Amino acid sequence: MNIHSEKILIIDFGSQTTQLIARRVREQKVYCEIHPYYTALAKIKELKPSGLILSGGPRSVYDTGAPKCDPGLFELDLPILGICYGAQLMVQEMGGVVEKAQKREFGKSVLDIKYYDGLFTGLDSNTDECQVWMSHGDRIEKLPDHFSVSAQSEHSPYAAIRHESRPLVGVQFHPEVAHTLIGTDVLRNFLFTLCKCRPLWTMGSFIDTTVDAIKQKVGSDQVICALSGGVDSAVTAALIHRAIGSQLTCIYVNNGLMRTNETASLLKFFAETTHLKVLDIDAVDYFLDELQGIVDPEIKRKKIGYGFIKIFEEEAKKLGNVKYLAQGTLYPDVIESVALDGGTVIKSHHNVGGLPDIMKLDLIEPLRELFKDEVRLLGLELGLPDEAVFRQPFPGPGLGIRIMGEVSRERLDILRQADVIVLEEMKKSGWYRKVWQSFAVLLPIQTVGVMGDERTYENVIALRCVDSLDAMTADWSKLPYELIGRISNRIINEVRGVNRVVLDVSSKPPSTIEWE
């Protein structure tokens, strides 16, 4: 069965939680995709979705230039769930009224359910009040014709609405966030009651469908796979190897930007635990020469991306009939590297935004529609060992984007020594598997210190540790003070050239996980 035969399209109006909506839908084993609000109606029809979810957004629907979808969307014979801005847009486009609220609602609110059907099917009708999470400064003042109220809150007379004869529903609260205690019930009712979806999106079904698709696409041609040792590229290689076997050649490029002993340990791992054919390419001098004098992070990423492609194409020529390059591109990579209409790219990922136009190899990106936690589940399903599946994410450009400013051998050596200490202490304390990522960053500044009664003027290391599920949002990890102190003390005492360690306590958004 085609696992994409049933899909939900999420129409994005710029909400910070759009990706969270997608995750919540996929947790119910229903496939979904995110598309920008300006997606053509013809394209939406072509995708044949089972239903649509209109996300929230930072604008007001009555603002000049506010993002709006094609109004024909509301004439489709499809279930539609509008969330916050999406609900207000539905109301306005269908003849209702949305205005600035006299009393805004941000944070926890109590929902008074009036209609125990549709979105609220199966909820305890003896409980009249439920906690939800609001985040809006506007409210619906008048419903369009044929719409009725399903729930109210203290400041929202239309906190949940429904069309009386069509599967059109809207909520002012955010069912995707954990603070909305009935959020999973609301989304499940939309997916399975209104959209009639079935839970077909599993890693087992994904493997079967993707393996068949790779076989059909590749045929008898050869594929090379960019292998970094991270979970994304390892799972990509294992998935493609299952599909085409010996037609796959993996290429590991030592770009000089890896951590201490990582190249040797990665090659040993692949040799001892997999049946993959791996070529080891030493390109340290090439990459460090290319990065000399470069301080702009976008240029760094693009130069590194160009360098990888150059090497892959050179190796492909040596191998002969190679037509495809496989990469471990994930859905967050794609989302961050593509701007909404009128927006800006967050950053170019070396394997998305950093690819040169002249690349002659066709891409195979079997993980392009997956989030990181889904990739880990896929790796386990494919039989990869825990040490490969649960390795913390490491960026493709390596330490090159953890050194602020110019990359040099000397600065790489400083960062590598600090990084070893961070990883050793995180693993020794048992915190390595508790956090999403933990790493050191070398800052482009020097500060005054005192060592052995002498004045020093040396480098600063930032410690970055975050908790996340999919890298789309993250919060800084609340590590024990004793652990932070040990890491700081060891770095200052053991790494020559460093006299200060600082802790990064920023969340994503507004910050990103990596510093560049």
Image (spheres, rainbow, N blue to C red):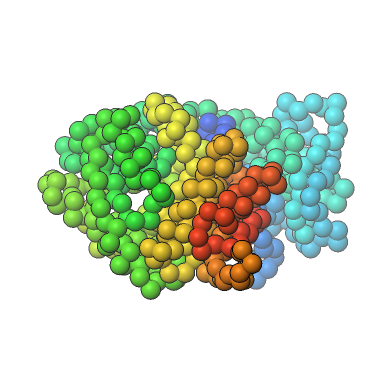
Q: Position of residue 221 (x, y in %)?
A: 17, 41
Does 142 sit above or below residue 296? above
Which of 256/345 is in front? 256
Residue most toward the bottom? Answer: 293
Q: Is residue 492 left or right of residue 156?
A: left
Which of 291/216 is in front? 291
**Residue drawn where x is 28% and y is 61% of the image:** 285
Query: In the rendered image, is residue 353 in sight?
Result: no
Does 62 sit above or below residue 361? below
**How many marks on residues?**
0
Q: Position of residue 2 (x, y in %)?
A: 39, 31
**Residue drawn where x is 50% and y is 60% of the image:** 496
Q: Where is residue 264 in the image (x, y as percent from the top left)?
A: 33, 42
Q: In this view, does 24 lie to the left or right of 402?
A: right
Image-quadrant location for residue 103: bottom right
**Residue drawn where x is 47% and y is 57% of the image:** 415
